[in-house]
Structure formats: C-alpha cells, structure tokens
Image: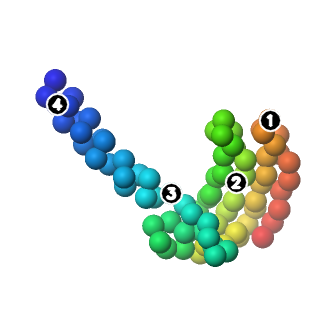
C-alpha cells in the first residue's frame, strides 16, 4: 500500500511538467517550452478525433499539412 501511495504522489507531482510541454502557436510560429518547435503537430476536435496534422520545422509549417472533417475523412492536403 505504501508503494502505491508513493507512486501515485510521484505521478501527480509530474502533472505540471506534462502541461508545460504542450505546443503553442503565437506570433506566426509554433513553440514548445519557449523554443521553436520541430516535429508533428496534431490538432484535435473536442471528441479527440484528429482535426489537422502539420509537419513543423523551426516553428514553421514545412511539408504536408492535412485537414480532416469531424467524421475523420480527409478534407484537404497542402504542401509547404
């Protein structure tokens, strides 16, 4: 029981760090932890279905960007 409580407390203490790792978009660029982001950015609808997938390099869209309808069907694809 003691190990379970310690594990639970450890996991709860990590929650603020998980939230701080979210990718943010402002001033025309994507950032993660205050630095320009490189990687895949996935935007979701409220029901957790994918709304868009964007390839990001140094904070800017670079590569393929896909947009999806709420049904999950691809709406549009763009290349940057």
Cα distance in 3D space between marks 4 and 3 = 30 Å
Which residue is at a point 26% across and 35% down the rendered structure image?
Answer: 8
Which residue is at a point 55% across and 61% down the rendered structure image?
Answer: 23
Q: Nearer the viewer, mark 4 or mark 3?
A: 3
Which residue is at a point 66% across and 40% down the rendered structure image?
Answer: 46
For mark 1, give the secondary structure: loop
**Disc nearer the start of the sequence (1/2):** 2
**Disc nearer the start of the sequence (3/1):** 3
Q: Residue 22 bears which disc, if any?
A: 3
Cα distance in 3D space between marks 4 and 1 = 43 Å
Q: Nearer the viewer, mark 1 or mark 2?
A: 1
Residue 3, above or below 21: above
Is residue 38 shown to the viewer in this render? no
Cα distance in 3D space between marks 1 and 2 = 15 Å
The residue carrying pointer 1 sits among few (fewer than 14), some (14 to 19) or many (20 or more) residues within 10 Å by Cα, namely few
Is residue 8 shown to the viewer in this render? yes
Residue position for label 1: 71
For mark 4, give the secondary structure: helix
Residue 1 on image: x %, y %? 16, 23
Give the residue furthest to the top.
Answer: 1
Q: Are marks 4 and 1 in contact (CB under 8 Å)?
A: no
Q: How is the image coloured?
A: rainbow
The residue carrying pointer 4 sits among few (fewer than 14), some (14 to 19) or many (20 or more) residues within 10 Å by Cα, namely few
Give the residue furthest to the left.
Answer: 2
Q: Residue 53 bears which disc, if any?
A: 2
Q: Nearer the viewer, mark 2 or mark 3?
A: 3
Cα distance in 3D space between marks 3 and 1 = 25 Å
Residue 42 on image: x %, y %? 64, 52
Q: Are marks 2 and 3 in contact (CB under 8 Å)?
A: no
Report whether 62 appears left or right of 14. Answer: right
**Disc nearer the start of the sequence (4/1):** 4
């Amino acid at each position: 029981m003691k190990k379970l409580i310690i594990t639970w407390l450890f996991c709860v203490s990590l929650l603020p760090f998980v939230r701080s790792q979210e990718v943010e978009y402002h001033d025309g660029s994507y950032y993660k932890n205050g630095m320009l982001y490189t990687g895949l950015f996935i935007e979701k609808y409220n029901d957790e279905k994918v709304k868009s997938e964007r390839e990001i390099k140094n904070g800017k869209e670079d590569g393929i960007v896909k947009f999806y309808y709420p049904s999950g069907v691809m709406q549009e694809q763009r290349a940057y």
